[in-house]
Image (cartoon, rainbow, N blue to C red):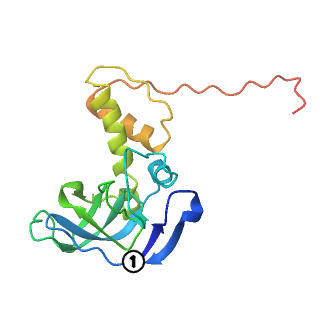
């Protein structure tokens, strides 16, 4: 199969398109035909070796830790999905990622793709949603009725955080926009 592999730590020159063996699903895995993936900051951080000591990899490595696609095969103990199911996932960051035609993912990391989302839209959700969830609920302990200010609400994590906070019943202040005041004597 075709995959974008990382040959070693360093800059973009470490990435190349290559032919690699198609993954075989483990007992609890589903094999997903990749229809869409996304690029996240963790990808370049791994490539640049900024996570040294936290995550160790063998090379070549396939990055890409969001995926949406169709199940094509299941492991002997995987029972939640069947071939043909449309799914999305934030795969295990300690395994090969989704910059490939196929990816094997433990079924506990996989969810049915919502019908109202395209594959591309679904592949943009998992990692930003997990980051927003962890920030708001696991670390900050956000509850109904509390107030929370979310900076960069137009970005992936921020926009997901606003939705999760509002769904919980927290108060998220609306942005206040003021037009730029340009003096009448300006020579602009």
Vertical order, 150 against 110 (above or below) = above
Q: Position of residue 28 (x, y in %)?
A: 15, 63
With 156 as the anchor, is 78 left or right in this view?
left
Image quarter of residue 29: bottom left
The image quadrant of residue 113 is: bottom left
- Per the image, label 1 sits on a secondary structure element best described as loop
Residue at the (15%, 70%) spot, across then down: 75
In front of the other: 175 or 158? 158
Residue 57: x and y in percent read 38, 57
Depth check, front residue: 170 or 13: 13
Can you give x and y, in whole percent of width and height, for residue 4 in the image? 47, 69
Query: Looking at the image, is 20 positioned above or below residue 152?
Result: below
Badge count: 1
Extreme top residue here? 146
Give whichever of 4, 186 is nearer the camera: 4
Quarter of the N terminus within the rendering: bottom left
Q: Is residue 72 above or below residue 99?
A: below
Q: Quadrant of residue 188?
A: top right
- Residue depicted at x 42% and y 60%: 63
Other-residue count near label 1 (Cα within 10 Å), few / some / many at <14 / 14–19 / ≥20: some
Above or below for 4 versus 126 = below
Residue annotated with mark 1? 20
Residue, x 29% and y 73% (percent of image)?
A: 23
Residue name at image x 18 percent, y 68 percent: 26
């Amino acid at each position: 199969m075709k995959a974008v592999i990382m040959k070693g730590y360093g800059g973009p020159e470490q990435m190349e398109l290559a032919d690699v063996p198609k993954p075989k699903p483990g007992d609890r895995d589903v094999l997903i035909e990749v229809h869409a993936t996304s690029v996240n900051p963790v990808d370049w951080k791994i490539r640049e070796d900024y996570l040294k000591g936290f995550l160790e990899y063998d090379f070549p490595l396939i990055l890409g830790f969001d995926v949406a696609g169709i199940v094509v095969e299941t492991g002997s103990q995987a029972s939640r999905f069947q071939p043909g199911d449309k799914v999305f996932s934030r795969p295990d960051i300690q395994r090969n990622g989704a910059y490939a035609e196929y990816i094997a993912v433990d079924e506990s990391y996989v969810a049915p793709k919502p019908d109202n989302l395209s594959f591309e839209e679904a592949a943009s959700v998992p990692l930003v949603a997990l980051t927003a969830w962890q920030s708001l609920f696991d670390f900050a302990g956000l509850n109904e009725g509390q107030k929370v200010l979310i900076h960069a609400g137009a970005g992936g994590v921020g926009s997901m955080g606003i939705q999760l906070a509002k769904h919980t019943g927290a108060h998220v202040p609306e942005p206040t926009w003021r037009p730029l005041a340009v003096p009448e004597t300006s020579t602009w």
